[in-house]
Image (cartoon, rainbow, N blue to C red):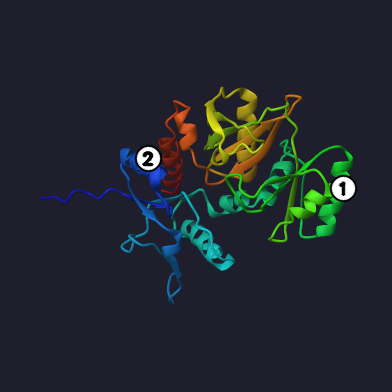
């Protein structure tokens, strides 16, 4: 009897598979691939006198056909660097990774994201990043003198945690970051009580779905209580989101945009490991197969 060929295998890097892991596994299965959840914390790099290798639990008999990153666990600097080293090493061994380690580095670091957006002439809030308390205070003084306010954000952060709006020197001093890095961004003024932003999903360079996040507070992250609502993906919204994704060179991303009180669009953030459960609830687009397709396109190109 001829043995049935085993389906090619995919690694989904995550510590909390949950709903996202399940729908991704189903999407890969529909395309003929078997997915396995793996924590990057459990992977290692071996340089043992021969060809260097990456050891992934569950893939001891051969590396996966590709890997999709759903999470990079936090830790010490050395721990996080090692996990990113795994993502950097796999493509050198012929294993496509989506999103790439480099793309994740660019997007988790808000300073580099802001730099790349501005370099590509994409409208993004004025931003200043420094380790100097004096330099931060000087920037704030100029902005406050113009009647504007600032948002102080963690350089590495997500889901709206640790974000503070400041309008005076005293408020800035009271909000001093524990990390010693001041990431200051000009607050985009919207209409009174208009607390909303737009999340656009871009996959393989194309804007595919969008939603509004509406809040009772100026922080509009879903994790902070905002509600997700359907919206039209109009051409300007799509164009800016696609340009932002291109600026950071990423396979798929959630781009966050704001509209000021004069109707102008601004790109706030580009997310390298975006969640999409809220978006899926308000769009007819089936998202997981799109993300699986981005990796499978990389695999086909590599072959």
| Residue 110 picture location, percent across and down | 66, 49
Question: Residue 133 occupies which quadrant of the picture?
Answer: bottom right
Question: Residue 262 occupies which quadrant of the picture?
Answer: top right
In the picture of the structure, the residue carrying the numbered disc 2 is: 23
In the picture of the structure, the residue carrying the numbered disc 1 is: 141
Viewer-proximal residue among 214 and 183: 214
Q: Where 194 falls versus 45 (above or below)? A: above
Q: Is residue 196 left or right of residue 131?
A: left
Q: Earlier in the sequence, mark 2 or mark 1?
A: 2
**Extreme residue toward the left, this view:** 1
Residue drawn at x 10%, y 50% is 1
| Residue 179 picture location, percent across and down | 68, 61
Q: Is residue 141 left or right of residue 177?
A: right
User: Which circle, 2 or 1, is nearer the viewer?
Assistant: 1
Q: Are marks 2 and 1 in contact (CB under 8 Å)?
A: no
Q: Is residue 147 left or right of residue 183?
A: right
| Residue 143 picture location, percent across and down | 85, 43
Viewer-proximal residue among 80 and 161: 161
Q: Where 289 falls versus 80 (above or below)? A: above
SS of the residue under disc 2 = helix
**Residue 116: image tag:** none
């Amino acid at each position: 009897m001829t043995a049935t060929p085993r389906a090619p295998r995919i690694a989904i890097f995550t510590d909390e598979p949950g709903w996202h892991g399940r729908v991704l596994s189903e999407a890969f299965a529909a395309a003929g691939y078997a997915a396995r959840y793996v924590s990057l914390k459990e992977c290692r790099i071996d340089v043992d006198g021969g060809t260097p290798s990456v050891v992934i639990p569950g893939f001891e008999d051969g590396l996966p056909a590709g890997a999709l990153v759903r999470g990079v666990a936090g830790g010490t600097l050395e721990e996080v660097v090692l996990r990113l080293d795994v993502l950097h090493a796999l493509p050198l061994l012929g294993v496509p990774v989506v999103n790439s380690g480099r793309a994740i580095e660019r997007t988790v670091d808000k300073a580099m994201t802001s730099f790349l957006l501005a370099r590509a002439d994409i409208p993004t809030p004025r931003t200043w990043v420094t380790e100097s308390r004096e330099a931060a205070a000087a920037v704030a003084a100029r902005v406050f003198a113009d009647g504007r306010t600032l948002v102080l954000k963690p350089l590495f952060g997500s889901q709206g945690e640790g974000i503070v709006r400041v309008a005076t020197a005293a408020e800035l001093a009271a909000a001093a970051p524990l990390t010693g890095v001041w990431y200051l961004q000009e607050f985009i003024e919207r209409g009174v009580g208009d607390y909303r932003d737009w999340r656009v999903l871009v996959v393989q360079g194309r804007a595919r779905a969008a939603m509004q996040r509406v809040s009772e507070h100026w922080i509009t992250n879903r994790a902070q209580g905002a509600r997700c609502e359907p919206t039209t993906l109009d051409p300007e919204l799509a164009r800016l989101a696609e340009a932002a994704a291109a600026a950071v060179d990423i396979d798929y991303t959630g781009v966050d945009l704001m509209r000021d009180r004069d109707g102008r669009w601004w790109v706030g953030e580009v997310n390298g490991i975006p969640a999409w459960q809220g978006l899926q609830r308000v769009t007819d687009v089936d998202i997981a197969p799109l993300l699986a397709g981005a990796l499978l396109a990389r695999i086909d190109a590599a072959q």
